[in-house]
Amino acid sequence: MIVRDRVRAAAELQDAGRYAEAAEAWLTAWAAATEERKGVPILVGLRANYLSCVERLECEIKKSEYPSPGTVLRHLNPTGKVLAEAEYRGEQDVVYAGRSYSSLSAAARAASQELGMAGVGVNGWRFWGLRRRRDDSWLSRLEAQSELPAQDSPSRQVA
């Protein structure tokens, strides 16, 4: 009975689009099913639902990280001088120096070559100041979003 109630609660959260809470609820249902020694098919189903929530949550987080269309992206030197500037028009449209590029990284590569940094690997997110450090775990990003106020990087400026 406890497992059924927890599964129902998790399903309601998932249907409401509250994926972080739903993922936690699926884990709670998994623990209850394990404690009650439910069969493997139930545990496999609970795991599948949990993973579905995690995937949807990762997609939502990724979408929320992109700048708004029309955002002017700037690459700054340590003193704050603008070295390169691009306009973000959409997920596959970044305009740098009058040319359209299919990604933040492609535009960053073109800008870095112009700046004499040819041959250096370029991460578009870091180059344009959208990400300061590498932390790709969805859980870390979720925790950071929920606990800390959003802070724009000094390199990311909106025109």
Image (tube, rainbow, N blue to C red):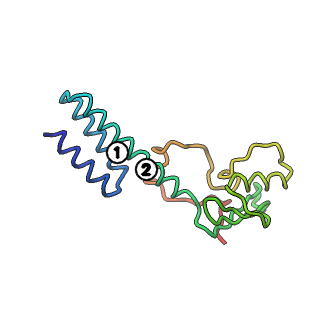
Looking at the picture, does residue 141 appear above or below residue 94? above
Q: CA distance from mark 1 to mark 2?
A: 9 Å
Looking at the picture, does residue 84 appear above or below residue 56? below
- Measured as percent of width and height from the top left, residue 92 is found at 64, 59
Left or right? Give the position of 13 relative to 156: left
Q: Nearer the viewer, residue 94 or 45?
A: 45
* Label 1 sits on residue: 23
Counting the numbered discs, the total is: 2
Left or right? Give the position of 143 relative to 121: left
Q: Amino acid at mark 1?
A: Ala
Q: Within 10 Å of the Cα at label 2, are there few (<14), some (14-19), or many (20+) other Cα atoms?
A: many
Instruction: Give SS at disc 2.
Output: helix
- Measured as percent of width and height from the top left, residue 119 is found at 82, 43
Q: Within 10 Å of the Cα at label 1, are there few (<14), some (14-19), or many (20+) other Cα atoms?
A: many
* Residue at the image position 63 percent from the left and 55 percent from the top: 130
Q: Nearer the viewer, residue 137 or 26?
A: 26
Quick one: label 1 or label 2, which is nearer the N terminus?
1
Looking at the picture, does residue 41 appear above or below residue 154? above
Left or right? Give the position of 12 relative to 113: left
Instruction: Give SS at disc 1.
Output: helix
* Label 2 sits on residue: 57
